Amino acid sequence: MTYSKKPNPFNPNGVVPPSLFAGRSTQINKILRKLELVKTGSPASFIFVGDKGIGKTALAKLTRFVAMNNDQDLYKLNFLSSYYSVARGQTAQDVLQASLNELTEMMSPGVINKIQKHLGNLFSNGKFSIGAFGASVEVSRGNKQGETTVRDQAISILSNVITAIREDKDSPKDGVLIVIDELNNLLNIQECAQLIKGIVTTLDVKDLGFISLILIGYKDTERKFFEGDESARRNIDEVLLNPMPEEEAYEILCKGFIKAEVKWNESEARAAIKRTAGYPYAVQLLGHNAYESDKDGNIDEDDWANATVSTALELQSKEFSTMYSFKGKRGSRELIIDCVIENNACLTKSDLNNQCPKQNVYREISKLIQQGSLTQDAEGNICISSQLFRLAVIFSKPDLLKQ
């Protein structure tokens, strides 16, 4: 009898459905409880912080899904929401305008007509235009006039949008949720904390605080962001994401395999999870490849071995592509990473500096930790971030494969 497989439950490149989302329960419940307060006019904003592949975007997308779904059994949230990923070099004006225009795609005709009557040149042909009567006003290089124009016009737009969607007879909403991803790409990010604080605070004073923003970036991004206005920390909650504990990562695999109605060995699955170092994207991809390898409805040791190799190779051109030059010229970062891998153990910073052909590695180590290729253990030793990354590098170096 031919084994008939169900669709693969793991989708590493898409939004994780709520039924398969695992872990992060503390963070998600804290966020959703605050969104409940936003329904009452108390604004709440967040900055999701963590390494690449740690699950920041997945958590934001799940939050947005729940916030828009109006689930009577799950916080009963019904927000108008937009999601925007910042391109390198974009200004705050660009991003605010794009985020607001994303909102228009889900507005009812009644809301569109109402804001059109009040916003004049700021809203034309179904699109918002921020700037002096639609002209470009950059928020950069200390242009205080530009900052004020963008802030005031964003406040005017959001005031009208919030009022209109809450009074909409056809489909009233609780408020507005704006998600801004890849904050690290933003031009002159230091000026944006004050801008966002000014917009949200003014709306709150006007009794229109039905707004929440989710900003997504790295730890260094967060530092630069708040350099512009440290007081903005009072208005924006940090949601720090670390690698998942093994139990939470194992729950991801369990939910997927149960949905696919296959069997698996717990000890083999847990051993495979350790290779991911608790990075949710890697866990999803590993589960996807293990299920693809399966031919008999039982995820066995061979399936895990095939999945590990496939995942490491796929990550060369995905998550790991910005962490290591697998095919091009290998510079100082590659020399440092190779040194850690060839030792097959964690090294003290001093030992790494002495053994690496690249001299004075100390300045490079923090950058490599931030980008996710290296990590630091409790004793301060430098280690490779995950076995999957280690394998990805080894597969690109025939001389290491022979060892």
Image (cartoon, helix red, strand yellow):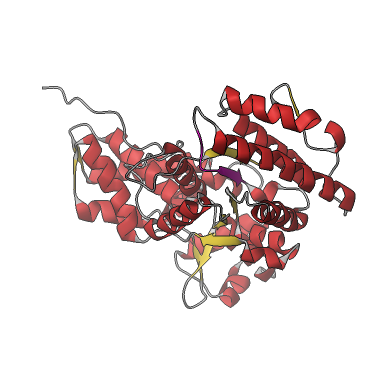
**Residue 45 image point, x, y percent:** 58, 55
Q: Give the quarter of the figure containing the N terminus.
A: top left
Query: Measured from the top left, where is residue 233 in percent x and y?
Result: 64, 65
Residue depicted at 46% across the width and 49% down the height:
59
Number of disc labels:
0
Query: On screen, 362 above or below 72?
Result: below
> Going 45% across and 40% down the picture, which residue do you hit?
65
Is residue 346 rendered magenta in the image? no
From the top left corner, tell me how far across and down residue 24 is, in percent.
Answer: 40, 56
Query: Is 166 displayed left or right of 402 in the figure?
Result: right
Q: Quadrant of residue 218?
A: bottom right
Describe residue 350's horizontal placement relative to residue 10 as left or right.
Answer: right
For residue 91, say whether it is visible: no
The span picked out in magenta is: 172-181
Is-magenta flag for residue 174? yes
| Camera-nearest residue between 307 and 80 | 80
Tell whether 57 sits left or right of 104. Answer: left
